[in-house]
C-alpha cells in the first residue's frame, strides 16, 4: 500500500512503528519517514540502491523540526537529492564533518612519519577549527559562505599576548600566520575531496586562497658584519644561539630542539631531528662549524640541549624574542630583526654564493620550490656573470 509522505495529512495517518515509510523520488532513490510515536515530529531518511553491489544504502536526514510541517517533505527531498547526487559523482557513502576531515588529515600526516608536523597541525586545528561552528558541518553541506565566515573570524580575532597577565595585550594576527592556518584546513579538505568524502572543492577553492606577500619579514637581511654586531650585543647564552643560526641555516625552533647527542664529533655530522621538513636529516659540517658545535656538546649529557639558556633550559620563541630585539636595538639595527632573520640571511648568502639550489634546500630543510620562490631572484647576478664569461 502506498503512503503519502508529501502532505501533513498523509503523514498524520501513518501508524507509529520502527520501520520507515518510503516514497519514491527517482529510480532506486527513496525518501523515508520514521514515526516512533504519534506525538513526535518524526525523522526523515534517504535510501539509494547501488546496482554494482546490489545493496541499499541509507542516511539519516534529521527531523527538519525548524521548518513548517507543510514544508518538511520538500526540505527532506532536497537534502536526499543532494546526497543522491553526491553518490552519483562517486562520493563516499560515509559522511564526514569538517572536524572529522581535519582529524583524518592529522592521522595521515602522522602515518607518513611526520610526527612533529602532525602535532603542529593538530594544535592548529584545536585552536582555530574545533571550537568554531564550521567544525560540525558535513562536508557535502559545506558552502563558500561557511568558509568565508570562518576566514573572516580568523582574520579579525586579535592575538592575545601573555593571556595570564593582569592586563593582557593584543595584536593583529599576522598574514603569514593566517596563511598557515588556512593551508592546514585546505590540505585537510583536499584530502577529504581526494578520498571521495566530497565531490567538489568549490566551497574552499577561492575562500582559502593564501594572502600574497605575507612573508615580507624574510626580507630583513643582515650581512656578515651586521650579524656579528648582533651577536656581540647579545647576552652570552643568546650570542651562542645566534652564532649557531649564523653558521647553518636552520629554523630557530629546529636549532633549539637539538640535543648534545645530535652532534657526532668523529664524523663532524649534525643530525636535525625536529623541523618542518619531517624526518631526520644529517648535515656534514666544515671544520670551523664542527669545532663550534663540538664546544657546545662538550661535557653534556646526550639528552641535554646542545644550545641552552643560561639556566640550562632549552630556547623557545618566547625566550629569544625580546632579547633578540634588545640586541638588535643595541647594535643599531632595524626593529623588525628576529631570530628568523639569521636563517634568511644565511640562505641568502648560500644562494648568492652560487651553491646549487637543491643543496641549499637540503641543508636548510625546505623544498627547492620554496627556495626558488623566495630566493630565486638573487641568482640574476650569477646569470649575468656567466653570460659575460661567454663573450669572445
Image (spheres, rainbow, N blue to C red):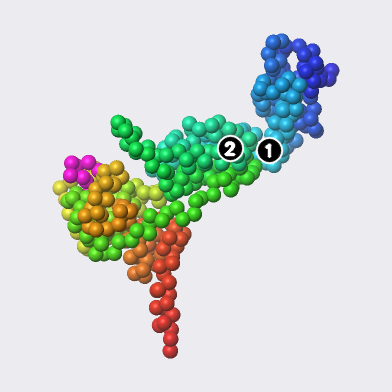
Q: Residue at x 72, y 28 (%)?
A: 75
Residue named by callout 1: 86
Q: Is residue 83 toward the left or the right of residue 211 in the image?
A: right
Q: Where residue 327 appears, x then y in whole percent?
A: 23, 53
Q: Is residue 153 toward the left or the right of residue 227 in the image?
A: right
Residue positioned most to the left: 299
- Looking at the rendered structure, the secondary structure element under dot 1 is helix
- Looking at the rendered structure, the secondary structure element under dot 2 is helix
| Disc assigned to residue 67 | none
Q: Residue at x 80, y 27 (%)?
A: 24
Q: Is residue 300 above or below residue 337?
A: above
Q: Nearer the viewer, residue 331 or 283?
A: 331
Gap between marks 1 and 2, in whole Å? 19 Å
Magenta span: helix, strand or loop, mainly?
A: loop
Residue named by callout 2: 146
Q: Residue at x 17, y 51 (%)?
A: 236
- Range covered by the magenta-colored residues: 307-314
Residue 339 is one of the magenta-drawn residues = no
Counting residues from the start of the chain, the first of labels 1 and 2 encountered is 1
Q: Is residue 340 toward the left or the right of residue 201 in the image?
A: left
Q: Residues within 10 Å of mark 2 (few under 14, many from 20)?
A: some
Q: Quadrant of residue 330?
A: bottom left
Count of numbered marks: 2
Q: Residue at x 69, y 23 (%)?
A: 67
Amino acid at each position: 500500500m502506498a503512503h503519502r509522505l508529501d502532505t501533513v495529512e498523509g503523514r498524520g495517518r501513518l501508524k507509529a512503528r520502527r520501520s520507515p515509510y518510503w516514497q519514491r523520488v527517482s529510480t532506486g532513490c527513496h525518501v523515508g519517514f520514521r514515526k516512533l510515536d504519534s506525538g513526535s515530529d518524526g525523522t526523515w531518511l534517504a535510501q539509494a540502491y547501488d546496482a554494482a553491489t546490489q545493496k541499499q544504502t541509507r542516511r539519516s536526514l534529521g527531523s527538519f523540526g525548524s521548518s513548517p510541517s507543510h514544508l518538511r517533505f520538500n526540505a527532506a527531498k532536497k537534502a536526499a537529492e543532494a546526497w543522491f547526487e553526491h553518490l552519483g559523482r562517486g562520493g563516499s557513502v560515509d559522511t564526514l564533518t569538517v572536524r572529522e576531515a581535519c582529524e583524518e588529515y592529522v592521522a595521515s600526516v602522522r602515518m607518513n612519519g611526520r610526527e612533529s608536523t602532525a602535532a603542529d597541525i593538530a594544535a592548529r586545528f584545536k585552536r582555530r577549527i574545533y571550537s568554531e561552528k564550521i567544525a560540525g558541518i558535513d562536508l557535502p553541506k559545506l558552502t563558500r559562505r561557511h568558509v568565508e565566515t570562518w576566514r573572516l573570524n580568523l582574520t579579525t580575532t586579535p592575538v592575545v599576548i601573555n593571556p595570564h597577565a593582569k592586563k593582557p595585550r593584543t595584536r593583529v594576527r599576522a598574514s603569514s600566520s593566517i596563511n598557515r592556518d588556512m593551508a592546514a584546513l585546505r590540505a585537510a579538505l583536499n584530502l577529504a575531496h581526494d578520498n571521495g568524502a566530497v565531490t567538489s572543492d568549490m566551497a574552499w577553492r577561492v575562500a582559502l586562497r593564501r594572502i600574497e606577500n605575507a612573508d615580507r619579514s624574510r626580507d630583513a637581511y643582515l650581512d656578515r658584519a651586521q650579524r656579528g654586531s648582533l651577536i656581540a650585543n647579545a647576552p652570552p647564552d643568546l650570542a651562542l644561539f645566534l652564532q649557531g643560526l649564523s653558521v647553518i641555516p636552520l629554523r630557530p625552533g629546529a636549532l633549539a630542539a637539538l640535543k648534545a647527542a645530535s652532534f657526532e664529533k668523529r664524523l663532524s655530522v649534525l643530525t636535525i631531528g625536529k623541523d618542518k621538513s619531517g624526518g631526520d636529516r644529517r648535515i656534514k659540517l666544515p671544520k670551523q662549524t664542527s669545532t663550534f658545535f663540538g664546544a657546545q656538546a662538550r661535557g653534556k649529557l646526550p639528552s641535554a640541549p646542545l644550545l641552552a639558556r643560561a639556566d640550562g633550559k632549552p630556547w623557545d620563541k618566547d625566550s629569544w624574542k625580546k632579547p633578540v630585539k634588545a640586541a638588535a636595538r643595541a647594535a643599531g639595527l632595524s626593529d623588525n630583526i628576529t631570530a628568523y632573520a639569521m636563517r634568511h640571511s644565511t640562505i641568502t648568502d648560500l644562494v648568492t654564493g652560487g651553491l646549487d639550489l637543491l643543496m641549499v634546500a637540503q641543508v636548510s630543510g625546505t623544498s627547492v620550490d620554496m627556495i626558488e620562490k623566495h630566493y630565486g631572484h638573487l641568482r640574476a647576478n650569477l646569470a649575468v656573470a656567466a653570460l659575460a664569461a661567454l663573450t669572445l
